[in-house]
Image: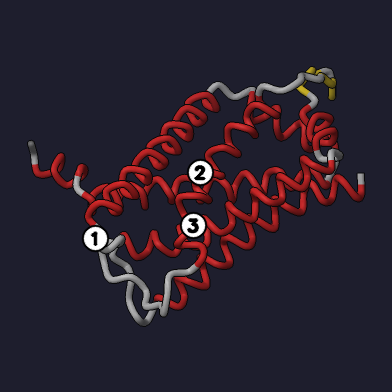
Amino acid sequence: MSANSSFLTSTIGKKYLMALTAIVWSLFVMVHMIGNMLIVVGAEAYNNYSHALTSNPIIYLIEAFLVAVLLFHAVTGLTLVVRNSRTKPKFYAVTPMREKSASIASRTMIYTGTATLAFVIWHLITFKFGPEYFVTYNGIEMRDIYKLVIEKFHEPLYVAGYGLVMILIGLHLYHGVQSIFQTLGLSHPRYNKFFKIFGYTYAVVVAAGFISQPLFVYFAR
């Protein structure tokens, strides 16, 4: 077995891969949240945005890449949890930020991660593979995803469930984002406070941004 192979299958190597895949999905959820804010602009803007994405052939490669990264992240994370429970090693490749005790976010990563994976599947079934409505703008027929979103975001249970999951995703991001810096060896007493604040801010912005969308639709549309 080569040195590279040995590293990638080691606990430290897997943690580095977890960090890299976490970067990909952390960036994706932020971009996705920002794009979805077009729901407040109106049907035409939202549908045109969705059509521009889905009508580009490269979107299928991007979707396949994101799914592969997510599954790899989930499987690797589960592997580390099992390995950690057996050997009880320190979780990070470098010294973690000093805390009196593990935060709720860090202690529930496996649960919030599982909830995130379940939500992605639920989200895809609901919207990507859900009912298809169509609308025409400037002679171009496209899927009326706006109508489907409006329908779902007027269901009280759906809005409540969506909001709850976003809080869990926020918790996952809060610990996960700041952990990226630690795992990549960037942890330092001078910068750790910044990393923690950055992780908190990133998580709040993403979670609040997503939660605001169904609330806006439910109460204002």
Pointer 1 or 3: first along the chain: 1
How far apart are the two marked residues, 2 and 1, measured between alpha carbons? Answer: 22 Å
Q: Residues within 10 Å of mark 1 (few under 14, many from 20)?
A: few
Q: Residue furthest front?
A: 86
| Nearer to me, 115 or 8 | 115
Please state the horizontal and vertical placement of residue 156, each as a whole percent of the image: 84, 43
Assess whether mark 3 and mark 2 are in contact (beta carbons under 8 angstroms).
no
Going by the image, does 8 lie left or right of 50?
left
Going by the image, does 49 lie left or right of 89?
right
At 63% from the left and 26% from the top, the residue drawn is 54
At 34% from the left and 49% from the top, the residue drawn is 81
Badge 2 amino acid: Thr
Assess whether mark 3 and mark 1 are in contact (beta carbons under 8 angstroms).
no
At 80% from the left and 29% from the top, the residue drawn is 148
Quarter of the image where one finds residue 189: bottom left
Pointer 2 or 3: first along the chain: 3
Which label number is shown at residue 114? 2
Please state the horizontal and vertical placement of residue 143, each as a whole percent of the image: 76, 22
Residue 36 in the image: above or below residue 151: below
Q: Which residue is mark 1?
A: 89
Q: Which residue is mark 3?
A: 108
